[in-house]
Image (cartoon, grey):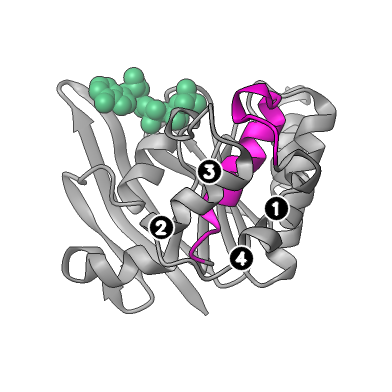
Amino acid sequence: MTVLEVRNLKKSFGSIRAVQDINFAVKAGEVFTIIGPNGAGKTTTLEMIEGLVTPDHGDIFFGELNWNHHANTIKKKIGVQPQSSAMFDLLTPEENLNLFATFYDQARSTEEILQLINLTDHRHNQTKKLSGGQRQRLAIGLAMISDPEIIFLDEPTTGLDPQARRNIWDIILQLKEIGKTTILTTHYMEEAEKLSDRVCIVDQGKVITLDTPSALIEKLTKEREVRLSF
Ligand code: ATP
């Protein structure tokens, strides 16, 4: 079942054509990864789907619902990982979660979220004392407050050490186990391969290719062999 479909998305900032023509459909329960180099248009694409940036052109559907007509209903279905700066450094992770719960309809308990993001042992520490990886886990927890069907994670592992990255991967895999759909952006092919059901490669604001990780790797390997044989 398709939970999200984007059609002919375009967005420019002045003369910069950040997103030129993006089309894809995401299935329920999958980890769908958008991968591409710096400036490829990943964040702009995600922010249009999240409703943070208005597309110049194109349509975004959540199931049958078009963003343009059903924004309020759609906002209840999606969870967006907040910027690190949106957390209150002087509060503890538990207090941050409880505070966010007052902004959104809390559907998953703070206790459950602390366990999911593996921060139960740090629940009473000040957020400013958390490591980069722990902060990212808290950000994912904050996106989970309303128990959304679809979760958006924009480069959640960028800048983290290998162990901290693996900890984030564990959470993404747990989200999949409990039936969530995750849309992820990353720079790392290894990460896309390990986590994703399907990978969408974007460059210069366009979809270059979209497939399962194994099919993509086979395709890329064949292309390399063809290039080397000349
Ligand atoms: P990165 O991996 O570096 O985060 P990205 O693939 O997420 O890159 P975007 O952040 O979507 O790419 O940016 C695509 C292009 O649009 C870039 O050239 C970027 O400089 C430009 N851009 C993005 N947001 C804005 C903005 N608010 N104003 C002007 N230009 C922007």
Task: Say what amino acid the circle numbered 2 marks.
Answer: Thr
Q: How many marks?
A: 4
Mark 4 and mark 3 lie on one chain; the one further toward the N terminus is 3
Whether ligand 1 has any atom under 8 Å from the Cβ at mark 3 is answered as: no
Q: Disc 1 designates what residue?
A: 114
Residue ID at (28%, 44%): 52
Kindly report the distance in space between the C-alpha atoms of the residues bearing marks 2 and 3. 10 Å
The numbered disc on residue 102 is 2
Task: Say what amino acid the circle numbered 1 marks.
Answer: Leu
**Mark 3 and mark 2 in contact (Cβ < 8 Å)?**
no
Mark 4 and mark 1 lie on one chain; the one further toward the N terminus is 4
Query: Can residue 196 be found in the magenta stretch?
Result: no
The numbered disc on residue 109 is 4
Q: Magenta segment range?
A: 124-146
Q: The residue tagged with tag 4: helix, strand or loop?
A: loop
* Structural crowding at the residue carrying mark 4, measured as other residues with C-alpha within 10 Å and reported as few (<14), some (14–19) or many (≥20): some
* Structural crowding at the residue carrying mark 1, measured as other residues with C-alpha within 10 Å and reported as few (<14), some (14–19) or many (≥20): many
Mark 4 and mark 2 lie on one chain; the one further toward the N terminus is 2
- Quadrant of residue 131 within the rendered picture: top right
The percent position of residue 147, horizontal first and vertical second, equals 54, 67
Can the viewer see residue 216 in this picture? yes
Q: Disc 3 designates what residue?
A: 96
The percent position of residue 215, horizontal first and vertical second, equals 72, 53
Q: The residue tagged with tag 3: helix, strand or loop?
A: helix
Mark 2 and mark 3 lie on one chain; the one further toward the N terminus is 3
The percent position of residue 213, horizontal first and vertical second, equals 72, 50
